[in-house]
Amino acid sequence: MAPVSLQSVSKVYANGVKAVDSVSLSIADGEFVVLVGPSGCGKSTTLRMIAGLEEISAGSLLVGGARMNDVPARNRNMAMVFQNYALYPHLDVRRNMAFGLERRRTHGSVIKAVLSPSYRAARAAEQQAIDTRVTAAAATLGIQSLLQRKPRELSGGQRQRVAVGRALVRDPVAFLFDEPLSNLDAKLRGEMRTELRLLHQRLRATMVYVTHDQEEAMSLADRLVVMKDGVVQQVGTPSEVYGHPANRFVAGFVGTPSMNFIQGSIEAAGVFRWGGGALQLPPTRWTGLSGWHGKPVELGIRPDQIRVGTGSCKGRVITVENYGDRMDVVIESGGRRITSRLPTASIREGSETTFEPMLDAAHLFDPSAAGATLA
Amino acid sequence: MNLRGAARSLALLPLVLGGAALLFPLWWMVVVSLETPERAGAAITGGTGLTLWPPSPQWQNYPQALREMGGAEPWVGFTNALANSVVITVLVLIGTVLSSSLVGYAFARVRFRGREGLFVVMLGTMMLPGQVTIIPLFLLFRSLGWIDSLLPLAVPAFFGNAFFIFMYRQFIAQLPESLFEAARIDGYGHLGIWLRIILPLCKPVNAICAVFTFVAVWNDFLGPLVYLHSDEQATLAVALNSFRNQYGGLEDVHLLMAASLVTMVPCILLFLAAQRQFVEGLSQGAVKG
């Protein structure tokens, strides 16, 4: 295993499209880092540059301190799990898992094996070692009974396990995952998430994982890298990114349901005025924002920080999504839709209600395109 | 017979007629090959009609035909021609499959400057009639000292065939890119990917390539006639010509038909063996997106 470091790495395609713009990132040895962002944000391209499947247009990639920009993918000793599994259809599960190891063996020549008994013995011992590793990896993933099957005879979840197993049998410097769970159903996805997390705990391997699913990212990552338009927006632990988003994009992307954004302005003494009325911000939220008085700002508040049935804001309940243990209530107020996440309560769609944002946990954002966090 | 049965029979009628038309030459060959010399000669000149099956089948025509084929010594002409045909066909088959799949892979998956232009040029060579290149190729092979050897017939196969390169390229291009990327991550270069991934996955194209090449080379008359001069180097297709007399006429048409039928057998067997792969391959483009 080895640390991976990207230094101002960019990717510009021949048609001039800049897919990744000066990404700098240090991934520690044994760390589980998740690159997350919407489609087209450059996360997969970044991963593919680490793997060696895409050329790096500018910047440096260091693995274990060595510059890897010009090292072909086959010599980087990375293991990768693909979105569509990429299992070799003509090989059974055992051969699929052993495929990379067979390439790396030192006694690979069949001709020499025929001609020299000692070479033949060494080759057989090597084959034995490969079989042992494949069997051990299969046992770890619970796929021993599938070793003789072809990929077409497997379900989606089984194929996913084989793909992980193919990476596992190797002793790579880093594991790379490119949206490996996106083709699975929700239940299986949840199970595989737990297994990947356990796998990481057991191996303590460097893992770089790409997903567009922020929930998956939050549940797996030691550290999250949130990307948009080829640019890293924020790097931090899931708690940091959730609790202290760097900008409006990160705040809106992370968390389910999404953060509520309310446009308004700050008046003197920390009053936030919007279409639904006025809210008194606590001093911790508006101190230092004297330059923004009278100017438009955006207030962000997470759905679980909005109480319903109390407070001074008024609105009408337009939908209630009941999940059994909790419910998401959408309230229309001041021309905006505000989502609140509550424990179950008896709230009827169409009823008038009051609500109260817990402003201690609110964020204020610059309403311009950059959307920087003000407080 | 009910109405549905009658409609089905009516629908089958064109198929039966078409099948009969296609089988007619084969039937004619079989019947003539089993006739006496007199009846066979009369059938050729139109002196007498053929019956559906010969009144007294002359099965000895078959060993006689092979014994007398292509030379003075019994059996030697046939065994020589058979060996030459087998050697040339196997070499051309191996050469065509290996070179065409390798070039097809390069056109489909290896990025290099001028790839598209070269592909168009390669396709352009398909428009060139083979006869146009006979004289330049003959001069080239003569300057290499290859005339009257098997080399002019076998070596060009190792430089690819435009039609099969096109087929391989189309087939390989529709395989998922991630398969190649996974193989690269697993440590394989282009040659390793071609050998370990492409060739096994191209089984339907390999089958088409093998069947087409086998039939074309096994039955090729012009190539061996131009490049091979001695009787020892003759292939089966050329050796069959020994049944014609010096004026180009046919005296032993029953023997020619018997020998021709024997030379057809490997083609029929190969087609039957590869039929499943072959049909799969032909429909490949139609069912894959």
Image: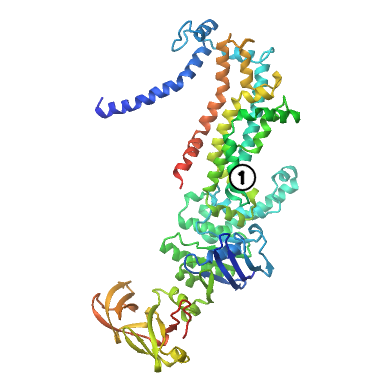
- Name the chain letter of the residue that bears numbered label 1: B
Residue A54 location in percent, x, y? 59, 60
Residue A130 location in percent, x, y? 63, 55
Residue located at (71% from left, 49% from top): A121
Q: Is residue A266 above or below residue A145?
A: below
Looking at the image, which is closer to me, B201 or A172? B201
Judge the density around disc 1: few (<14), some (14-19), many (≥20) Cα neighbours within 10 Å: few
Looking at the image, which is closer to me, B248 or B98? B248
Q: Would residue A247 appear left or right of A29 to someone viewing this image?
A: left
- Mark 1 lies on residue: B118
Q: Is residue B120 above or below residue B148?
A: below
Residue A36 location in percent, x, y? 50, 69
**Does any portion of residue B196 appear in the rendered image?**
no
Q: Would residue A244 appear left or right of B260 to someone viewing this image?
A: left
Residue located at (69% from left, 13% from top): B73
Residue A60 location in percent, x, y? 65, 68
Amino acid type at image mark 1: Leu
Quarter occupied by the N terminus of chain B: top left
Residue located at (50% from left, 51% from top): A151
**Does any portion of residue B16 appear in the rendered image?**
yes
Residue located at (41% from left, 63% from top): A186
